[in-house]
Image (tube, rainbow, N blue to C red):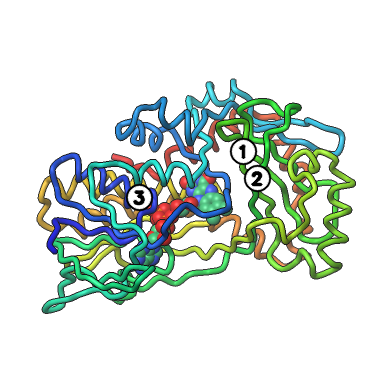
Amino acid sequence: MKRDIVIVGGGIGGCVLAALLGRAGRKVMVLERSTSAPMWTRPEILWPNTAETLFTLLPRETWEAQAMMPLQGIEVFNQGGFVSGVSQSDLDGAKVHPWSTNPNATRELLLGLDSFELRRGVEVAEVLKDNGRVIGVRAREVTGGKEFEVLADWTVGDDGGKSIVRRACDIELKTRLFPIEFFCFRFDWPKSFRVGAVHVIPNLDGVRGGVLALGGAPLPDDKGAGIIATLGQEFDRQRGPAETWTEWREKYPAVNDFVGDRQFPDDFAHVKRYWGHANRYGAPGAILMGDAAHPPSPAGGQGANMAVGDARVLAELLLANTPDVVSEYERRRRPANTRSLRPTRAANFVLGLPDWGRALIPWRTFGRLVGRHSLMIRHVLRFLSEAFQERK
Ligand SMILES: Cc1cc2nc3c(=O)[nH]c(=O)nc-3n(C[C@H](O)[C@H](O)[C@H](O)COP(=O)(O)OP(=O)(O)OC[C@H]3O[C@@H](n4cnc5c(N)ncnc54)[C@H](O)[C@@H]3O)c2cc1C
């Protein structure tokens, strides 16, 4: 079978690209390996520009009913209760109104769009080439193993950090393991929590072991997506995880509002992230986008926003039949993606320092300084909300 564009992977970037091209009349096929949404949930922040793109694909009311809600601030707690945070007036002052989303629900809504053809439960096993140019893929149904080929003018790899398209094109991507590991969970939004605000409990009061913070973001239907950040393997380096976990809960009673009677670590989804930036964004006949080209850490909430930023530019170039699509795409997207990786790079540097180096950093004073100066908060918010966008 022949299509104009075949997209390997139905992540947020691949789906948005497929929808933008499909509604303009291009024949697009998306091949997605998973047969259904993951069983676990994690938080995801989408910045206004990304949300606006999603609202062009489905009515805003549909997104709000099923997948996303406007964020009204960030509240930071210590042992005694609420201490500071980012208020609605900080968001208004920065003119930044982010969205908290359930990534599983956003992906399912996008995969359900009818402007492109979706083959679900299909894994791409081989990238096909003719005279050095990528001409399509060989795919296999996950259940049953039936194989088929899809030929296309362009093969787009939106297939994540381990991209088969990237490897087939010999594009180099040196990755580094992010020093923070994540434990994710879904919870019922406690009645005592402010509606619409992210809640964060940083470990400033000195629970030993590697817990850095616990956070929860609101989701539609009175649910929340929670995340515990731990410093790599340090969580159990000094003492057993169970002992540290108990101390953490005793010191910060609000933790119990989030996690209920879940046991650490078995009742959480454990996520490690590798990050990096590919040395090229494509090859003859093939283009990379999203995590396949530049996997970030969750620091700064950039990855999904970068993928949608890639999709917008790529759709524009393909629809305009731009002669040298790959170079033009890379020229326009690399500076923004490099900017978006900065929070990851900075966090990687600081948290990768030896224990004595990290101990020299005055975290508490730094936290207070940022908390007191709304100008600083607004500056950071503006940077994060725009980093992934092109600067014309
Ligand atoms: C804990 C955590 C928190 C995060 N928080 C944020 C946040 O707040 N804001 C933000 O913007 N980003 C966040 N991110 C990052 C964000 O989730 C990713 O960067 C984003 O999802 C990448 O989208 P993508 O379009 O590149 O596709 P991906 O999400 O990488 O999806 C790739 C798809 O390809 C499919 N696939 C892979 N190989 C094949 C194959 N061979 N054949 C067929 N299909 C294949 C996979 O099944 C998958 O569906 C977070 C990530 C994590 C882990």
Q: Earlier in the sequence, mark 1 or mark 3?
A: 3
Image coordinates for residue 283, horizontal then vertical, percent: 22, 68
Left or right of 133: which side holds 191? right
Instruction: Tell me if 71 is positioned left or right of 113 in this view.
Output: right
Residue 226 badge: 2
Badge 3 marks a residue whose secondary structure is helix
Q: Amino acid at mark 3?
A: Gly
Q: Is mark 3 within 8 Å of ligand 1?
A: yes
Ligand 1 has an atom within 8 Å of the beta carbon of the residue at disc 1: no
The amino acid at mark 2 is Gly
Question: In x, y percent, where is residue 156?
Answer: 26, 60
Name the residue located 78 percent from the left edge and 48 percent from the top edge: 203
| 134 shown above or below 301 | below
Residue that numbered label 1 is attached to:
217
Report the image quarter containing ligand 1.
Answer: bottom left
Q: Which residue is mark 3?
A: 13
Regarding mark 1 in the picture, which secondary structure is present there? strand
Extreme residue in the front direction: 144
| Quarter of the figure with residue 371 | top right
What residue appears at the point 47 percent right and 39 percent down from the top-left corner?
46
Q: Amino acid at mark 1?
A: Ala
Under tag 2, what secondary structure? strand
